[in-house]
Image (tube, helix red, strand yellow):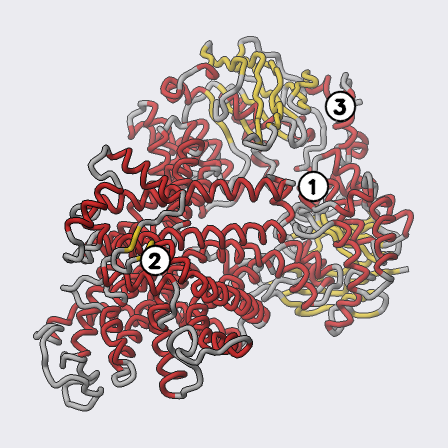
Amino acid sequence: MWKRFSSNRPALVGVVLLIAVIAVALLAPVLFPNGPWKMVQRPFLMPMAVDGLPLGTDTLGRDVAAQLAYGAQVSLLVGLVSTLVALLIGVPLGALAGFYGGYVDEGAMRFTEFFQTIPNFALAIVLVAIFEPTLASITLAIAIVSWPPVARLVRAEVMSVRRREFVDAARLAGLSKPRILLTQVLPNTVSPIIVMASLMVATAILLESSLSFLGLGDPNALSWGYMIGAARTVIRSAWWLSFFPGLAIIITVLALNLIGEGLNDALNPHLRQRGQKP
Amino acid sequence: MTVFIAILSRTAKALLTLLAIAVLNFFLIHAAPGDPAVVLAGEAGAADPQMIEQLRERFGLDQPFHVQLGKYVWGILQLDLGYSFRQGAPVIDLIADRLPATLLLTLTAFVISLVFGIALGVAAAARVGRASDSALTTLALLFYATPLYWAALMAVLVFSVWLGWLPGFGYETVGASYSGFARVLDIAKHLVLPALTLGLFFMAVYMRMTRASMLEVSTADFVKTAKAKGLSGPAIRRRHILRNAILPVVTLAGLQAGQLVGGAVLTETVFAWPGIGRLMFESLAARDYNTILGVFLVSAAMVILFNIVTDIVYRIVDPRIGARA
Amino acid sequence: MTTLAIEHLTIGLPPGADRPFATEDVSFTIDKGQILCVVGESGSGKSMTANALMGLLPPGVTVKAGRALFQDQDVLRLPEPQKQALRGARIAMIFQEPMTALNPLMRIGDQITEVFAAHNLYSPAERRMRALTLVREVGLPDPEKIIRAYPFQLSGGQRQRAMIAMALALEPDLLIADEPTTALDVTTQAQILRLVLDLRDRRGMAVMFITHDFGVVAEIADTVIVMREGRVVERGAAAQVLGDPQHEYTRRLLDAIPTGRLPPARPKADTPALEIKGLRKIYRTGGGLFRPVREVRAVDDVSLTVGRGEVLGLVGESGSGKSTLGRTAVRLVTPDGGQVLVGGVDLAALSEQDLRAQRHKVQMVFQDPYASLNPRQRIMGALTDGPIQKGVPRAQAQARARDLLEIVGLGADAARRFPHEFSGGQRQRIGIARALAMDPDLIIADEAVSALDVSIQAQVLDLLRDLRDRLNLSILFITHDLRVAAQLCDRIAVMQKGKLVEIGTVHDIFLSPRQDYTRQLLAAVPGGGWAHDAGLPA
């Protein structure tokens, strides 16, 4: 599996990019000990205009490079945690629905469908607006709007694995239903969940940045979306203030998508090898 | 007949969903920190005590919880989405005023993204493994990773500020008072950038899906049959692969409609497009919760409408559905 | 007159495949009006030649050497436009899976007329007329309705007939049939084979018929080639190959086929291992606001007994309810009525809790060797989960698992490995060991050898026969294949549409069946006549 992944050049590019972003996020306090909020020079400095400020300064004279580095922390943290929370909601719900079927399935799927019908970005806005923007509420809001696809995927996978004969064999062995679900069925659904999770982190980062762009970011945590939102009104005079944070988002999201696709190809090899069997 | 029944039951389900969203809204108001009346009036000291008292009475905030819920939902059934104290108008009027602009924007973006997404997906699948395929998929991957609002800002910067080709602001030229065809043309010009930037992301989504689906279907047994019958490559693609490959794309398009409507908030904000998304953004800054929740409900209704449309399309394309239902 | 001459054909597989060539130096000819059967097990390369002829080789697979002369043109070297003109018009092909070989979104009529359109022949009205004629010719009922139908509205046999109609549309000189009856029931298979013979006689076309089943060969072949690992190991007239095989591999294959040669009767068992009384299971589909409920009586008031040490064969076509009966007997499905008595306990009446304690009494061997083992669990786990759950100490269960793996011929080392390291036949042995690990009163084998190649099938049947004698096993052996049932079973029960049609000793059922349906089934067995000649007690 690793061999297949490592022979996939785009996926490796994704890994390298992601490692770079993570390194910047972790090293931010070392690289920029002053933090992202401190005024370091006069406002609206073009990139490379002054030594030591490769990306220039913002409307208040703060170091854009420092802001980007600290913003990486927020993006990655929110992306990761909200995905974990979404998995915590979606996996059990989908697993129960798919495994037990009947009324459990009916109920769980109506619930999921309901959340899938609601425009998820609008719901996220409403949730964050009503519960006051903090990192916790933003993370939770993103998780709440992102779990339905997980539940549907896990349900579909569980339903297909459940029909396999080894599950019947486990029942004949006298194992209890919960034990069959946990030890026989779920381990066989892990690959697609991993693939989906890596893509979800990317989506969550986009969502977080969109919320921050609208001014719904945590006022105490500087994020890329906030930077773009704050620079929106001065785009005519200071384009770089919007440009670089956007580039950072694209690189991070692209890296995660490349990794997700690489994992998909590596974990579901039948999609690539199809038609090559004699 | 079965199609009629299906649409009927689909509509009933849609109404139930909207009702559930109304209930959700009600709970959200009560879950918000602080007195619901104050929340509804728009915080930050804007509301005077008399207004708050009125609100209390109107929503029966002194009555038991379930009575309040009943009143709230009953109000929504009568299209009473509350009153915006900030804007001094009923929320439903505010939304009705802005809805056409949003519908124009989202529908245009939807059609653009679907048509171009599918066309490019088919083109890429037909050239799979070649340079043009790689170029298209790489581009799609880039669009897919680009935040909507950033693409919009950059489009304004390049095509409006630097090149001056297209207007980057508003719905029509202010004060020009065009009429007839000139006005249509003016609006169309204003529509180009918002619709394209909103559609770009979804175009990437549909293109990737179409390409993957085309490749998947092209390994199906019936494609082998078609080849054995002596059909040419283009005929096989058109008659056999495309129709089968399009089904999952239609499903996805229905599911993505929600994101499209949500994304309109961002696009409308950037382009000052006078739609309900922009209304929501303005209400956020003003903490005008009634309006926020109203827009939320209406956008959910739009999504349901999109879903019903894709459902009908699916039925037309796939003969098996009608027979099974 | 020779229609097709294949000369020294070698087809290369992509690097990394299990062997360098799909076929090596294959040569044969088919004359006008002749049926050639290409016989082989899976992976023998028998389909590759056909795919090469049609230009349907999968990516990475290429023709390395040789010629295929069709009407004096080498079709392998033709430019693509000419190949395309040939396909469907002069050479036509039908496939194994009628379920997936038709476009699900297109009406049958459109899929037939498309052949004319592809070759720019006739006006739309005439195409329709011809489609109707073809549909009638392949024996489909109500042609007007059929051409307007979608594939999902047709049965498997009807779809295969529709496929044949398509293939015949332009009166090809050569028809290639790639296992066209493998996915069908025996009676349907018999009808399709008759249709192919009929059409050959009427139209005088050459037929290349690919199959794994010597029974089918006996029914329709004029000449035969036998392939193994890409090479032709035997060739000749059908009667000669079947009656006097020269190559040792052909002999093995022929021996492996359950011919219907009946084993000597064994003494009748007295004590019952399983008693089924008045069993009923109804499946309801549909239902809801606007839809009527459809009821299918999958098992309809069936009573039967399996004696201790006896093998009872349960035979029927798809939809006969035989599998549902088996699954009900192990209580994977809960019946709507009736009793399943094992050792005096009615499994059908137990609560879920009590049932788990009684599960070990009846065990099952499943059909699909690739789905019956958890890919993420080691063999040891699969063999010990049940016994440990039952209360056997872990060490003892593991020791027993190793013993059993020895008994089924795999060796104790197998316990440490994962399922993907084993072949289909080996997995079936593991499945048998898993069932034995529970020390059951009864084993239900549900199509346990159906997914295996004939030679592997024979080995697994040998194992089951051996275990039956050594361990005095009681087995309910469910199969669609009467020939297999005859090899192993003491008695046979025949099911149709949920009902028990007939039950009796193997000799009674085969030699003096009382019911029409049983006679029909026996008559439909491919190669039945040949098996009789080959020494079935008359």
Amino acid type assigned to the residue bearing label 2 in the image: Phe
Residue C78 in sight here: yes
Q: Secondary structure at mark 3?
A: helix
Distance CA(mark 1)–CA(mark 2)? 42 Å
Q: Residues within 10 Å of mark 1 (few under 14, many from 20)?
A: some
Q: Disc 3 is attached to a residue of which chain?
A: C
Decide: is C302 above or below C316. Answer: above
Amino acid type assigned to the residue bearing label 3 in the image: Tyr
Q: Point out residue A272 in the picture as x, y percentages from the top left corner.
A: 50, 61
Distance CA(mark 1)–CA(mark 3)? 26 Å
Q: Point out residue C216 in the picture as x, y percentages from the top left corner.
A: 75, 41
Residue holding disc 3: C517
Quarter of the rendering containing residue A176: top left
Residue holding disc 2: A121
Decide: is C90 above or below C78. Answer: above
Pointer 1 or 3: first along the chain: 1
Q: Quadrant of the N terminus of chain B?
A: top right
Q: Nearer the viewer, residue C225 or A137?
A: A137
Decide: is C256 above or below C387. Answer: below
Q: Point out residue A99 in the picture as x, y percentages from the top left corner.
A: 41, 36
Amino acid type assigned to the residue bearing label 1 in the image: Gln
Tell which tag, 1 or 2, sits nearer the viewer. Answer: 2
Q: Which mark is residue C153?
A: 1
Circles 1 and 2, Cβ within 8 Å, touching? The answer is no
Q: Quadrant of the C terminus of chain B?
A: top right
Q: Secondary structure at mark 2?
A: helix
